[in-house]
Image (cartoon, rainbow, N blue to C red):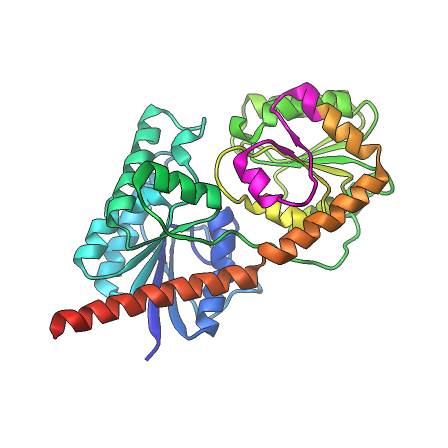
């Protein structure tokens, strides 16, 4: 009889929204390969059912919820948990500690839980005071009611031990190695020119305002490519559009849904700036490393952990420092080559999907085995 796992807290399978969704696209088929009966809960309209990689072995369940910035995670999490209570999986893999509010329901039903806590959402500038309180309270409930915790970085694990007194297992994100790709036709003007690249959602904690200021100086001598947007317009989008209109060598592409185009940009970049400051192991950074992107990173404990041993330069979130570090790297082809090799080596060693999926499968199996042993002991 196969083991049954329910995955709760993502937008569904297969979905391409963010880090959780990327992980589940890899993890769900890997669990099926290992003999698990996998159900992934999701939201209406968020799944790519035309995806050629869709695995028919994965059961997809869509539940209802409120589509709003502050309520969607909580409401979709609740309806998924309520559905799981009726279907009674052997173990639940819950993504995001905001779903900590619903863990007591799973515990009362005797369903063991493994929870990926995500980053430290209550430190993100995009959330208001109420949302930050909701996330932190969810974290406290997760610390109290989750059976097993998963952290995507050692620094996150240390934070949870310090703040909540809980330990767990560290399982980072993985990346995909790809064959060398040519730049797309629309990016052909960048060929044979060292260019700067940034890939980020347009929120302040990703150092986007500082990079946009730095980009004006970088573009005076090298092309600059900016990938990302807020998704709903606003001041940062307007600033990026204005820069692109002013400078011939500054290109704002907005959100890029074409994976191969993005991989090619990372592969050909002379300098990739990674400005993410909140959270643990960042999926975009790991993927950039697999592509061999010479990286300049904002100086945070998380970025230092991921880039350990690569020799990547770290900078404060200041436009002048960013511009200087990126420009210095763009002017040094030998240093670019050394960094390409070093970040690829680090990614292949510690951030592969094969290793990530094996660690999740092992953690779920251990939690299930422990619950079975406790059940047997209770009966005896």
Residue 258 visible, this orientation: no
Magenta stretch in the rendered image: 297-322
Residue 302 covered by magenta stretch = yes
Q: Identify which residue, 13 or 178, lies in the foreground.
A: 178
Q: Identify which residue, 185 or 306, lies in the foreground.
A: 306
- Locate residue 156, reporting x and y percent: 44, 42
**Res. 140 image quadrant:** top left
Horizontally, residue 371 falls left or right of residue 290, namely left
Q: Identify which residue, 347 or 50, lies in the foreground.
A: 347
- Locate residue 239, reporting x and y percent: 63, 21
Q: Residue at x 37, y 52 (%)?
A: 168
- Locate residue 43, reporting x and y percent: 39, 50
Q: Can you say whether 16 is above or below 128 in the image?
A: below
- Locate residue 335, reporting x and y percent: 80, 40
Horizontally, residue 361 falls left or right of residue 224, namely left
Horizontally, residue 40 falls left or right of residue 266, namely left
The single residue placed furthest to the right in the displayed view is 192
**Res. 193 image quadrant:** top right
Q: Can you say whether 152 is above or below 27 in the image?
A: above
Residue 99 visible, this orientation: yes
For the C terminus, the quadrant is bottom left
Q: Residue at x 27, y 48 (%)?
A: 78
Q: Residue at x 81, y 22 (%)?
A: 220
Residue 288 covered by magenta stretch = no
Q: Identify which residue, 225 or 56, lies in the foreground.
A: 225
For the N terminus, the quadrant is bottom left
Count of numbered marks: 0
Horizontally, residue 87 falls left or right of residue 149, namely left
């Amino acid at each position: 009889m196969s083991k049954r796992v329910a995955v709760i807290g993502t937008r569904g399978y297969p979905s391409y929204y963010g880090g959780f969704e990327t992980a589940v696209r890899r993890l769900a088929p890997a669990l099926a390969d290992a003999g698990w009966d996998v159900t992934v809960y999701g939201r209406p309209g968020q799944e790519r059912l035309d995806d050629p990689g869709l695995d028919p072995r994965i059961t997809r369940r869509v539940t209802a919820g409120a589509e709003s910035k502050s309520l969607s995670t909580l409401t979709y999490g609740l309806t998924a948990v309520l559905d799981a209570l009726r279907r009674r999986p052997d173990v639940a893999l819950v993504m995001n500690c905001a779903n900590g509010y619903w863990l007591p329901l799973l515990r009362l039903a005797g369903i063991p839980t493994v929870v990926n806590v995500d980053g430290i959402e209550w430190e993100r500038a995009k959330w208001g005071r109420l949302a930050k309180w909701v996330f932190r309270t969810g974290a406290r409930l997760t610390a109290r009611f989750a059976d097993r915790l998963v952290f995507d970085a050692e620094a996150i694990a240390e934070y949870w031990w310090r703040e909540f007194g809980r330990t767990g297992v560290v399982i980072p994100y993985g990346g995909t190695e790809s064959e060398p790709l040519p730049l797309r036709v629309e990016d052909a003007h960048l060929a044979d020119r060292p260019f700067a690249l940034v890939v980020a959602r347009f929120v302040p904690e990703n150092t986007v305002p500082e990079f946009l200021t730095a980009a004006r100086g970088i573009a005076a001598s090298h092309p600059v490519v900016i990938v990302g947007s807020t998704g709903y317009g606003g001041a940062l989008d307007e600033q990026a559009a204005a820069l692109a209109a002013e400078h011939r060598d500054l290109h704002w592409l907005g959100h890029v849904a074409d994976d191969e185009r993005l991989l090619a940009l990372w592969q050909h970049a002379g300098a990739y700036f990674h400005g993410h400051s909140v959270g643990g192991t960042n999926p975009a950074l790991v993927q950039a490393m697999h592509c061999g992107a010479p990286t300049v990173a904002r100086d945070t404990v998380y970025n230092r952990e991921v880039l350990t041993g690569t020799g990547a330069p770290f900078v404060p979130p200041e436009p002048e420092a960013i511009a200087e570090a990126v420009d210095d790297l763009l002017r040094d082809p030998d240093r670019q080559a050394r960094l390409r090799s070093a970040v690829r080596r680090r990614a292949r060693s510690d951030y592969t999907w094969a290793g990530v999926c094996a660690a999740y499968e092992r953690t779920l199996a251990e939690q299930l085995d422990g619950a079975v042993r406790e059940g047997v002991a209770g009966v005896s």
